[in-house]
Amino acid sequence: MIALGIDPGLSLTGWGVIEVFDRYKITPLNYGCIRTKPTQTLVERLQNINADLQAIINKYKPDVAAIEQLFFLKKAASVAQVGQARGAIVLTLALNKIKLFEYNPRSVKIALTGYGSADKFQMQNMVKIALGLKEVPQPDDAADALAMAICHVNTAGVKSATNE
Amino acid sequence: MIALGIDPGLSLTGWGVIEVFDRYKITPLNYGCIRTKPTQTLVERLQNINADLQAIINKYKPDVAAIEQLFFLKKAASVAQVGQARGAIVLTLALNKIKLFEYNPRSVKIALTGYGSADKFQMQNMVKIALGLKEVPQPDDAADALAMAICHVNTAGVKSATNE
């Protein structure tokens, strides 16, 4: 199974693709960031995200995707930006018939480190270990996206995985 | 020219298509609402909006689309819902290469009634008059979408029209 993790944002969307074999062994296929610029119009930015995500889907053909639940702790203006990017991303995945799973941040922390209050450093370190990498993946958004994909693989079928 | 006005929402997206001929004469082609249910998943709701909007685009082949700017006066949870719907809508328009224009509520009021503090009743009445309808279009979301399309036609090329 190939899982695509996504950390959505209008300026920066982290992504990470992992493959699972022999049920529990996971290996990273690739990861990175989709970047858009504030000088681009909203239309251009969403097109950019769509096109880059489509290229990733075409190349790695993920079976499933995992994305963080949208939280509202941030100010409304940033929720609006993330929300629009997320809407375009979810639609792109849906048009490609890729099954999408949502996880809340606490579930992701528990899935990776075993407890729900893990800090950023612990999380990134676990991503590195789980994927057998020499370094923590950069930038942070790509590491977060990989964490999401690992979370899905570790908890798929378990009740904390809520099919969006 | 055929203009599509859109009032985006996750539960209810109003839409209205108008045609302009002889430069200033406008006539309504059709209007209505795209509805999704809270019992649907987010993926299903965005797919539903995308499919219905695509059918409207295929049928009326709009040259341009007009949409309200996203404001942040509402609570973050509703901004997140509208934002995700709006992201899916903007991407659907972009994938169809339909040029999109954004208007703020005050510009729409000025374009239709001549002043920026017009109330809902005055706005709906002007939509009815401008389109030569016997009744105010229902529901409100469809009337708002038609107002957006009329605003674009009335102000296209004027500085209040900001190409998103």
Image (spheres, coloured by chain):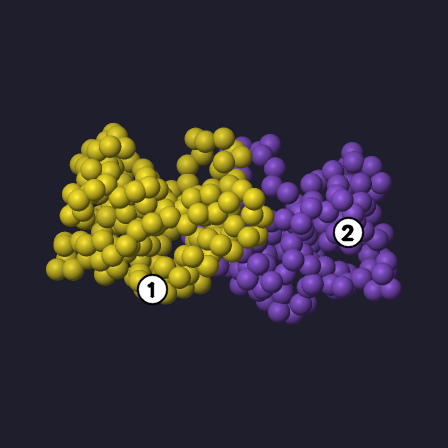
Chain colours: A purple, B yellow
Q: Relative to B38, does residue A96 appear above or below in the rendering?
A: below
Q: Secondary structure at mark 1?
A: helix
Q: Residue at x 49, y 30 (%)?
A: B75
In this picture, residue A16 sits left or right of residue A130: left
In the rendered structure, the residue with mark 1 lies on which chain?
B
* Secondary structure beneath label 2: loop
The spot of residue B40 in percent (x, y) is: 56, 47
Label 2 to label 1, Cα distance in Å?
42 Å
Q: Look at the picture and state if B58 lies above or below B83.
A: below
Chain for disc number 2: A
Q: Is residue B58 left or right of residue A109?
A: left
Can residue B44 be seen here? yes
Q: Quadrant of residue A135?
A: bottom right
Q: Amino acid at mark 2?
A: Gly
Q: Residue at x 27, y 39 (%)?
A: B107
Image coordinates of residue A29 in percent, x first then y, are 75, 64
As drawn, the label of residue A157 is 2
Residue B98 screen position, x and y as percent: 36, 61
Residue tagged by mark 1? B59
Q: Residue furthest left?
A: B22
Residue B93's image quarter?
A: bottom left
